[in-house]
Amino acid sequence: MLEWKVEIRRRLTGSNLEPTRETAIVEELEQYLEECYAELLAGGATEDDAYRATLAELNGGELLQQELQRAERKVAPEPIVLGTNREEKHDYRPMARPALRRANVDEAA
């Protein structure tokens, strides 16, 4: 088994990724490169040719760039609305309004 991790980590140097994200990216790319290499060998390529072609895939930059963008894509959290239960997606505010009005009336009296 080839050491794709070394090549991937070398290319990630200076990317300032969190260690857990970097590890996830390295693992996923390693799996992809290993599959690419195996497919080339199964297609009749020599070990050297398969290695060079797989490394060229990584060197192309698009693969690494896509993986970095995917890993760094931030999903905006759903806004929290007071008085709602996010899990049930039910708005409890209408039920709370009469109680609040009663409390305000009691305070005014």
Image: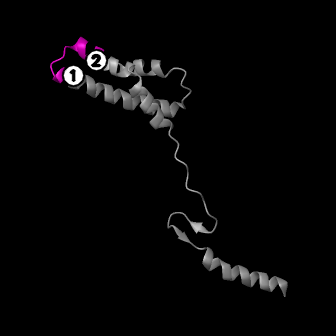
As for residue 42 lying within the magenta part, the answer is: yes
Q: Is residue 45 above or below residue 93?
A: above
Front residue of 38/76: it is 76
Dominant secondary-structure state across the stretch colored magenta:
helix
Q: Residues within 10 Å of mark 2 (few under 14, many from 20)?
A: some
Near mark 1 (Cα within 10 A), the count class, few <14, some 14-19 or many ≥20, is some
Write the residue at 48% across / 23% down. Answer: 12
Q: Position of residue 71 (x, y in %)?
A: 47, 36
The x, y position of residue 9, in whole percent, is 45, 21
Q: Is residue 67 above or below residue 10?
A: below
Q: Quadrant of residue 67?
A: top left
Say whether residue 32 is left or right of residue 20.
left
- Report the disc number at residue 12: none
What percent of the width, then of the height, locates residue 96?
65, 77
Residue at left 38%, top 32%? 28
| Residue 40 versus residue 66 in the image, above or below | above
Which residue lies under the disc numbered 1? 40
Measuring 25% from the left and 11% from the top, which residue is drawn there? 48
Residue 81, how many percent across, how many down? 62, 63
Label 2–label 1 contact, CB within 8 A:
yes
Q: Which residues are magenta?
A: 41-53
Residue annotated with mark 2: 53
Q: Quadrant of the C terminus?
A: bottom right
Q: As shown in the figure, which amino acid type bears the numbered disc 1?
A: Leu
